[in-house]
């Protein structure tokens, strides 16, 4: 927050940022046994005493056996290129109901943000008359547009269907393709599922339509699935694009090219600071797969992050204390997200002028707000987007920080705010009531 904004707030106001999808930053405690394993790997002397539980010691010993010379301080190339990919492949096979996964098509990376530009760069043809384009969802994470630009590609937005709960609208994608082809060459369709910040989870029907579309248009499908462990509704479970593609059968199952992502940051562990994740390549030719394994420009994931990723991918047998702790942690997180999603719906539904589609997954809600014409004119006079103006006024009056919808992109002529579902329920309740009271006063002020 800018110093000028901080000084303009009343002295009694304490800034409260409720925009983040970082679980630990929003008050969720880390899982102690995971940290204990990491601590023992870094300082093996802990394995000689009674400080750590036996389960953590056993898992740390296994991790150290996978390391060169039993030391996490080395590069440990084999751990990255062979050991962890094999365990990730087993995880994916379990996740997808038996759909096979080849460890050679799995790339362990230093988080999604660091590897996306490299992925996009592999489809960029610098000698072509027209620049390469990547279709990105609006609203959606800014990461994809930025990564496309770093790779030398052009980001082409396509609008999600807000009236259908932020579903991917095939007609909107085709319109974006048709309009873009006069100035660029679209090669990639990026789909974010579960959605961020929109909180939607795609149905199988929608996913099948997307797969047919990319097949017809000869596009690479890039599936950002990093929020997959945050799909919290039993009647709308997360399905991977790989599973749906496989179950659609020939010829699509063997021809549609797919790259999908998983991130430790958005996993049940929520360990953003350890920077690790992976991508899986499906139906991608070997000449494209090879650069991922040999390119020195890809940031290598931290060894400690890989150890945590390894635990999540290959948990101990049922009944083991680590497995039990993971399941309890996962259940608590999903219960909290589902409760807070209902809370957002209930409180905002009572505020005329605010509309929020039901959230099905992810860690944010994206309610739509109606802003009166006088407020729109005032924002224009200040050179601000209307939602940015609203969010600044909210901050100065209450200390609450919400994200303006224009930060994620939004349908033209609409205004939204993004807010996190991760705060403790009592804190989120206070924030929502403060937000609705401020909104009522804002409408009166600019009526």
Image (cartoon, rainbow, N blue to C red):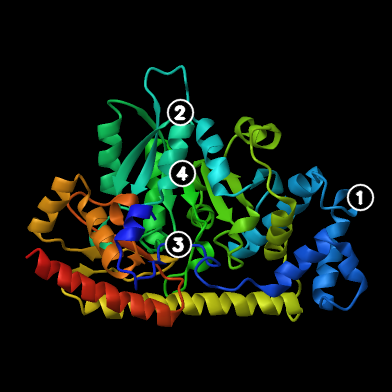
Residue 327 x, y percent position in the rendering: 63, 77
Left or right of 65? Residue 13 is: left
Please tell me whether mark 3 sits on a helix, a strand or a loop: loop
Q: Residues within 10 Å of mark 2 (few under 14, many from 20)?
A: some
Residue 29 placement: quadrant: bottom right
**Of pointers 1 and 2, the one earlier in the residue sequence:** 1
Alpha carbon separation for disc pair 1 and 4: 40 Å
Do tag 4 and tag 3 residues touch (Cβ < 8 Å)?
A: no
| Residue 222 appears anywhere in the view | yes
Q: Are marks 2 and 4 in contact (CB under 8 Å)?
A: no
For label 2, the SS is: loop
Distance from Cα at disc 1 to Cα at disc 2? 41 Å
Mark 2 → mark 3, Cα distance in angstroms = 29 Å
Asked whether residue 264 is in view, the answer is no
SS of the residue at dot 4? Answer: strand
Residue 221, labelled with which disc? 4
Q: Kindly identify which residue carries mark 1.
A: 69
Identify the mark nearer the N-term, 1 or 3. Answer: 3
According to the picture, the residue beneath numbered tag 2 turns out to be 152
* Disc 1 to disc 3, C-alpha distance: 39 Å
Q: Please identify, in this view, whether the residue under mark 2 or under mark 4 is nearer the observer.
A: 2
């Amino acid at each position: 927050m800018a110093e000028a904004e901080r000084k303009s707030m009343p002295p009694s106001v304490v800034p409260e940022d409720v925009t983040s999808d970082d679980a630990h930053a929003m008050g969720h405690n880390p899982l102690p046994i995971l940290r204990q394993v990491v601590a023992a790997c870094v300082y093996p002397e802990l394995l000689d005493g009674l400080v750590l539980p036996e389960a953590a010691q056993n898992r740390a010993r296994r991790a150290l056996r996978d390391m060169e010379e039993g030391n996490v301080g080395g590069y440990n190339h084999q751990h990255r290129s062979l050991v962890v990919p094999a365990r990730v492949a087993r995880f994916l096979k379990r996740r997808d109901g038996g759909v096979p996964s080849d460890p050679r098509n799995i790339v362990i990376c230093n988080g999604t943000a660091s590897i996306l530009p490299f992925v996009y760069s592999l489809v960029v043809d610098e000698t072509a008359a027209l620049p390469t384009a990547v279709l990105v969802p609006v609203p959606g994470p800014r990461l994809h547009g930025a990564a496309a630009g770093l790779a030398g590609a052009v980001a082409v937005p396509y609008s999600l269907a807000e009236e259908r709960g932020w579903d991917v609208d095939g007609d909107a994608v085709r319109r974006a393709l048709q309009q873009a082809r006069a100035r660029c060459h679209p090669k990639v369709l990026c789909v974010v599922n579960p959605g961020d910040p929109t909180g939607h989870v795609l149905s199988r029907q929608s996913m099948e339509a997307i797969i047919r579309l990319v097949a017809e248009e000869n596009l690479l499908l890039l599936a950002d699935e990093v929020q997959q462990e945050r799909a919290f509704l039993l009647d709308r479970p997360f399905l991977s694009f790989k599973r749906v593609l496989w179950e659609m059968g020939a010829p699509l199952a063997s021809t549609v090219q797919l790259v999908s992502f998983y991130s430790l940051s958005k996993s049940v562990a929520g360990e953003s600071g350890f920077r690790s994740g992976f991508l899986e390549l499906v139906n991608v030719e070997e000449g494209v797969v090879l650069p991922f394994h040999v390119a020195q420009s890809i940031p290598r994931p931290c060894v400690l992050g890989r150890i945590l990723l390894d635990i999540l991918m290959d948990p101990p047998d049922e009944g083991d204390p680590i497995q039990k702790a993971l399941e309890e942690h996962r259940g608590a997180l999903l219960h909290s997200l589902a409760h807070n999603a209902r809370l957002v719906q209930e409180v905002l539904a009572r505020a005329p002028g605010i509309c929020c589609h039901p959230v099905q997954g992810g860690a944010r809600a994206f309610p739509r707000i109606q802003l009166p014409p006088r407020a729109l004119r005032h924002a224009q006079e200040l050179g601000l987007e209307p939602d940015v103006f609203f969010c600044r006024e909210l901050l100065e009056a209450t200390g609450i920080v919400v994200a303006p919808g224009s930060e994620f992109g939004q349908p033209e002529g609409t205004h939204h705010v993004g807010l996190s579902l991760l705060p403790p329920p009592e804190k989120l309740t206070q924030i929502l009531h403060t937000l609705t009271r401020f909104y009522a006063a804002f409408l009166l002020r600019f009526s």
